[in-house]
Amino acid sequence: MSAETTPGTGAGSAETRTPSVRGEWPLYEVFVRGKRGLNHVHVGSLHAPDDQMALRHARDVYTRRNEGVSLWVVRSSSITASSPDEKDPMFAPAGDKVYRHPTFYDIPDDVPHM
Amino acid sequence: MVDPNAQSSAVQNLKQRTARKGASKGGVVMTTQINESELEAQFAATIGAKDRIEPRDWMPEKYRKTVVRQVAQHAHSEIIGMQPEGNWISRAPSLRRKAILLAKVQDEAGHGLYLYSAAETLGASRDELTEKLIAGKQKYSSIFNYPTLAYTDVGTIGWLVDGAAIVNQVPLCRTSFGPYGRAMIRVCKEESFHQRQGYELLMTMMRGTDEQRASVQESVNRFWWPALMMFGPPDDDSPNTEQSMEWGIKTHTNDELRQKFVDMSVPQAEALGVTFPDEGLKWNEERGHYDFSTPDWDEFWSVVKGNGPCNDQRVAHRKRAWDEGAWVRDAALAFAENSAVDSAPTDSPETPTADTADTTAEEAAK
């Protein structure tokens, strides 16, 4: 979940705050494919020392009850996210292009299969 | 191997977050200056529309602090909550009961992790939260400061404590802070198993000997009042409730949820064949609810302040697990660092490392 907020926070804060000798395990974001035919969906995050352990932890934390058939894990620090502050310039170009939608076009009701 | 499309679909592409942070220091301000009152108005509009606040949105500092405090306290409760029941894993009466109890306690750990993950979206670090817990600077639910004196308590906790937790948590699925609500949805899905296994355990004992039935009643007597206290102090003594309701963090008051829990529990107790230790408990036709006596709030505050039967033991145990696990955390990190160094020379797209070679070959074969 943290990628939604502060990508890289996990790694950054580790150096400054933790009392442990080596610091905090890096943060990973977890994506689960619920079943074949569906996209992987973000479900949350976890800490792990490396990619393989992140997968194992993801299995234990996020798929204890057949929640998925496939898992992706990715370091939160590797994710680049848009910010809500840039919402307008980022997404506005799509807003005024109504002609991209099928409802923009008037077709007589008696034309079949359209 | 991750499908390369994932990067475009899962990840929105903008590095402005860091750029923006640096901007205020470096003097290169890219974004238009939006003043605080405009941001506050945007925030209030989002809350007013019952829309969710997401982690990177602007939010009042007090909102951020309130959410972090509540989510951390909730996470700590799940983690500390493993102890009372974990106490009986090695002494569960059958393999079936042991497997159930193990699964339940594992779920509590999972719930704690979902919630820590939600708190981290607001910049709190996991280690920092754990350190605050073991230093006594952050609280967890008082219910876990009561001991589990008999295996029967596993059943009572499932029925009443997890039952109360469900009443608390179902409305939280719609809390205004997005990650908290999403974590709650996952938790609630699993919590029903917790309550049902507890109730079934008690039903089984009620079909047993007189001694077993007495044990169930005795256990219910001990847990009833602490379970009612799980909803927090009465509304007129809960200073944060109003603000939290205004912000949509809470959607019901403590007393509303407590009443709901009492109303739900009475028929369950009747079906089970036990009573609650409250002579004031009776149906009020006019209100359409059960009346019940006032919990002993002096006891509640005393337990909150650290004087419950097990406060010291619970925190000491968590601290021991944390301290004794430090070498494992360090070793795993050292191993990861060494492995990264070992594989560094071959770490390029053209020459996959041993780990990825198999997958690549497998994909090529397809």
Image (cartoon, coloured by chain):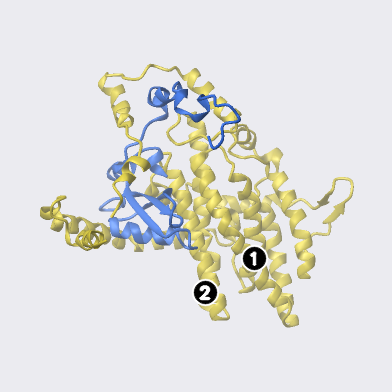
Q: Is residue B155 left or right of residue B140?
A: right
Residue A84 found in image quarter: top left
| Above or below B50: residue B314 | below
Which chain hosts label 2? B
| Above or below B39: residue B317 | below
Circle 1 is placed at which residue position?
B196
Residue B9, given in percent of the width and then of the height, sits at: 36, 41
Which chain hosts label 1? B
Q: Nearer the viewer, residue B14 or B340?
A: B14
Chain that is coloured blue in the picture? A
Q: Name the amino acid, label 1.
A: Arg
Residue B152 appearing in the image: yes
Q: Are marks 2 and 1 on the same chain?
A: yes
Q: Which quadrant: the N terminus of chain B? A: bottom left
Circle 2 is placed at which residue position?
B99
Tell me how far mark 2 sits from mark 1, CA to CA.
Answer: 15 Å
Q: Reading the chain from its start, which is encountered first: label 2 or label 1?
A: 2
